[in-house]
Image: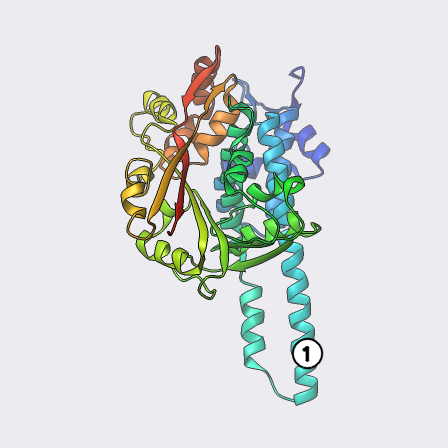
Amino acid sequence: MKKPGYYSSGEFARMAHVTLRTIRYYDKQNILKPSLVLESGARFYSDEDFARLQQILLLKYLGFSLDDIRNMTITDSDYHFMINSLNIQLKLVQDRIEQMQLVEKAIQDTTAAIQTEHAVDWNQMLNLIHLTNMEKSFKNQYQNASNISARINLHSLFSQNPQGWFPWIYEQCQIHPGMRILEIGCGDGTLWTSNLSRLPKDLHITLSDISEGMLRDTRRALNANDVNFTFKVFDCHNIPFKNESFDLVIANHVLFYCEDIKQVCTEVRRVLKPDGMFLCSTYGRNHMKEVSDLVQEFDERIVLSADKLYEIFGRENGMAILKPCFSQVTWKPYEDSLLIPEPEPLISYILSCHGNQNQYILDRYMEFLSFVKKKTRYGFHITKDAGIFLCKVS
């Protein structure tokens, strides 16, 4: 029996230009389940299911396995998820285009070398193997970019401080013409893309990250800007610049991920000019605590982070960690909180965390959505306990 607003499996497949067998297979593999199943077993799909199918087909086109796709998608057509998903998919396609262009050039160079030298250059052949074996890095990049976007999105939408975190950070940097700046762990470059109009022209800014994918995203976003941006992949435990190279070094929510914070601070101090400044941000033990309380109320087994990052480097212990390297260390709090009136951006944030939440939420997603809807009905308040340490050497 035809249901208003729903399509039978056959109609859904025809409209999407895929086979009915494909739709049934995705159903069986728990990748795309029907929105409605009648007691008779008849299966129906909604308009919203097309969004997930689009995402699945694109990821499949880009070379991801069905197991990868199952872990990289979620059933929700809310516009927050849709915009975030489409933006990340766009970056993924751009990455694939760049990769294929590199493969094309590598094949041309290898062919030319063989024709000229009448011998195989095995170093070029190894480069080809590397370029054609990047699926894992693309998957990691997709997940990392999606996670970062979800976290930034929640704060940008619902922060009660109208200035916003990144404009506030920029203000604390005290940037002026002629400065040489290094950001370690720049992520997707939001600090700079959100403050482009405020940048003086006479700057040299080096953006670094351990992830090549993150730097690709950042380079694309900043490529047309007049400011002199340089992009470099390296581990901040060993900063590849000469002593006294920079006026300002920035580490925005980075130090608590470092294996040896003392070594990173030693490197930062080495590359800072005598009158330079190190700005590093972190948070305290009360930061976003209501989110952890929320998920544990839903299922006490959920832990959003295996590590309490504020215990590694946080507001409470950061001064003691930084003092051996910097004679002047000042804590400056960012006064803010969140008020969440709707469930979807909060759920997106929760799913982006580094804990075990997906293990207990994805199979009960609709139940979790209903639970969070009730919690956000009258606004869900979240404490923010974040800020920066400003460090100098006298």
Residue at screen point 52% across, 49% down: 141
Residue at screen point 66% across, 61% down: 100
Q: Position of residue 111 (x, y in %)?
A: 68, 78
Can residue 73 be seen in this snapshot?
A: no
Q: Which residue is mark 1?
A: 111
Q: Position of residue 280 (x, y in %)?
A: 42, 44
Q: Is 142 positioned to the left or the right of 358 in the image?
A: right
Q: Position of residue 343 (x, y in %)?
A: 50, 21
88 and 63: which is toward the camera: 88
Q: Is 359 positioned to the left or the right of 141 in the image?
A: left
Extreme residue toward the front, this view: 394
Q: Position of residue 372 (x, y in %)?
A: 44, 19
Secondary element under disc 1, as helix, strand or loop, is helix
Mark 1 neighbour density, 10 Å: few (under 14) some (14–19) many (20 or more): some
Instruction: Work out whether 249 lies above or below 374.
Output: below
Q: Is 11 positioned to the left or the right of 244 in the image?
A: right
Q: Amino acid at mark 1?
A: Thr
| Picture quadrant where residue 230 is located | bottom right
Can residue 161 be seen in this snapshot?
A: yes
